[in-house]
Amino acid sequence: MEQQRAARAHLHQRSRLALGYGNAGLGNAVDGRRVPGTYAYHCSIHPFMHGKVRVPIKVSPASGSTSTVFTITLASTSQTGYSFDVQKKVQPSGPWTFWKTGVTSLSVTFHHTSAGSWRFRSRLHKNGSTATSGWSPTKMVTIS
């Protein structure tokens, strides 16, 4: 049992390059909870063991009418010393644009008076620094 724990510990080292988290479980962020974004990990003992963990945002509901208010959840708990950047994109081929930056709340809301579809993604941003996670996988809302 102790050997298994030790083996897992060395496999799950997040890259210190981006945010300086040090050792952390896969898909976990600063305080041990999953925070949307893309995070590199590597094994300091076995250089061939590396990859990325992609943690998605949550969107609720996924579809609605022009009177629907959509909630985009960025984290389950506050992240001291960090904020979120959120981008949106009009489907099918609009460019990604910064929608919200420096967000410290756990969620943001979206409402639009026209029918259409929008994609959202977020990343964790270390305050006072240019360090960020990669962008989270996208989620789409559809308004009809």
Image: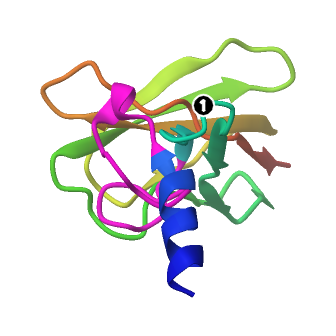
- Colour setting: rainbow
Identity of the residue drawn at 71% across and 51% down: 66
Label 1, secondary structure: give it.
Answer: loop
Q: Nearer the viewer, residue 11 or 73?
A: 11
Q: Nearer the viewer, residue 42 or 45?
A: 45
Q: Is residue 122 rendered to the left or right of residue 58?
A: left
Residue furthest toward the bottom? 1
Residue 91 coordinates in the image, percent (x, y)? 81, 26
Q: Which residues are magenta?
A: 14-36
Q: Mark 1: which amino acid?
A: Pro
Identity of the residue drawn at 24% across and 44% down: 82
Q: Is residue 5 rendered to the left or right of residue 89?
A: left
Does residue 12 appear in this view? no
Q: Is residue 16 above or below residue 34?
A: above
Residue 37 coordinates in the image, percent (x, y)? 53, 42
Q: Is residue 18 magenta?
A: yes
Residue 53 coordinates in the image, percent (x, y)? 63, 46
Identity of the residue drawn at 55% across and 38% down: 42
Q: Magenta region, mostly helix, strand or loop?
A: loop
Query: Quadrant of the image for the N terminus?
Result: bottom right
Does residue 118 appear in this view? yes
Q: Quadrant of residue 50?
A: top right
Q: Is residue 6 rendered to the left or right of residue 68?
A: left
Q: Is residue 29 above or below residue 128?
A: below
Q: Which residue is mark 1?
A: 47
